[in-house]
Image (cartoon, rainbow, N blue to C red):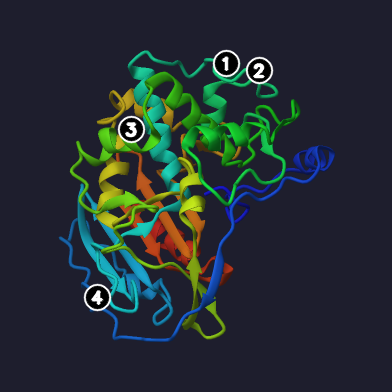
Amino acid sequence: MLSSRRRPRQSIWPQVVATLLMLGVVGTVGFAVGKRAQPQIRKSQPVTPLKLKPSTAVPMDLRQYLPKKQFSGVAALYRNGKRVATLAQGQATTQALNTPATMFEIDSVQKSLTAGLVMHEAMQGKLHLHDKLHQYFPQIPGSETITIRQLLDMDSGLSVHGSFMNREYVDDQTTVDRLITKLRYSSAMNGQGYYQAANYVVLVGILMKVTGQSYQTLVENQYIKPLHLAHTRFAYDRDVAGVAQGHYWGKHGVTDATIANTTHAQQHQELGTGQLMMSIDDLYTVESALLSGRLVGGRNASALLFAPGSLSTYGGGMYQNGPYRSANGFGYGFECFLRITQSGRDAVIVMSNCSVPKAVNEVASDKIAQAWLTH
């Protein structure tokens, strides 16, 4: 997603803060409007017990980590490519419960898919990671210094001044062009990790230039069709069957949560950064295929793509966390947390359609990952 709702793992160093003060205000570029939802609570779906072979068993229960009555979403554990434990709880909508097939917005976790598309084109020889941005968008400040690799790692030195989102969506190229007029460059920040989703919108612009195809077409041809993803669609799709409704935490938690209303224009303009709705298994399928190298030209290409680019450890849409990689998504009443081993075989995924305060779900995801992925 594109706004300051994003919470990167690493704090910004004092020199970063000083640089930003010189740059001026960096505006948020995404927003959501909520209205009061009518409480209509149903009994949560039963929990799938955690039953594993002794060699892989972990003394844990997903219910011990996530809020017992205040978690609305789906969480799952994966071992050797298979889902072995599931917690589905709460309501997707007022008419349906959350299930493993429910589609949630993955928000910024989508950036790893965008990075995978870039690597695919690199393996096809249509671009190179060391290409200077000037080759594609010479009008962007600092483009003679910035590389595609730096865009992937968010250490380009670029930031957004003000908002580029418009009430009316025209097309993806217009979205990219409007963003470019809002970009600012800091040479002091070049090479320093600084989370700015605009880097990935620029990458989408490059993808469209070198392929002559829309971002949606690329996603469909590289992910949805070859991986047979039956529960994946773009947020602006008119077909909402099986899609969860996002909510914001209410005074009493889930029971009086407010609906997160978003427009199709907003969803279109989250270009490459937070427009996909996916089920938990579809998300695992894609991320596992990316990390294994299946979709990007082998394990060596995958290791190169997701290598940490700076002290923030961010690279290719993921953070490096010792034995596993992670990605976080926040926005429009959804949360998504991915923790997955470098082989792509084992994973923890937590998806929620109600944003909760104090990073409760994120903290829970990290605790589950420590228990499940590091033993």
Label 2 or label 4, whichever lies nearer to me, is: 2
Q: CA distance from mark 2 to mark 4?
A: 52 Å
Question: In the figure, residue 153 lies in which quadrant?
Answer: top right
**What number is the disc on residue 132?**
1
Q: Where's residue 235, x and y in %?
A: 39, 53
CA gap between label 2 and label 1 equals 6 Å
The residue singled out by tag 3 in the image is 218
From where the camera sits, is residue 346 visible?
Answer: no
Labels 2 and 1 touching (C-beta < 8 A): yes
Q: Amino acid at mark 4?
A: Val
Q: Earlier in the sequence, mark 2 or mark 1?
A: 1
Mark 3 or 2: in front is: 3
Question: Which residue is at 81% across, 42% downward?
Answer: 24
- The residue carrying mark 4 is 47
Q: Quadrant of residue 157?
A: top right
Residue at disc 2, secondary structure: loop
Q: Could you say which is closer to the camera, residue 123 or residue 181?
A: 181
Badge 1 or badge 3: first in the primary sequence: 1
Numbered tag placed on residue 91 in the rendering:
none
- Disc 3 from disc 2: Cα separation: 28 Å
Per the image, the residue denoted by label 2 is 145
Viewer-proximal residue among 282 and 14: 282
The answer to whether residue 12 is left or right of residue 206 is right
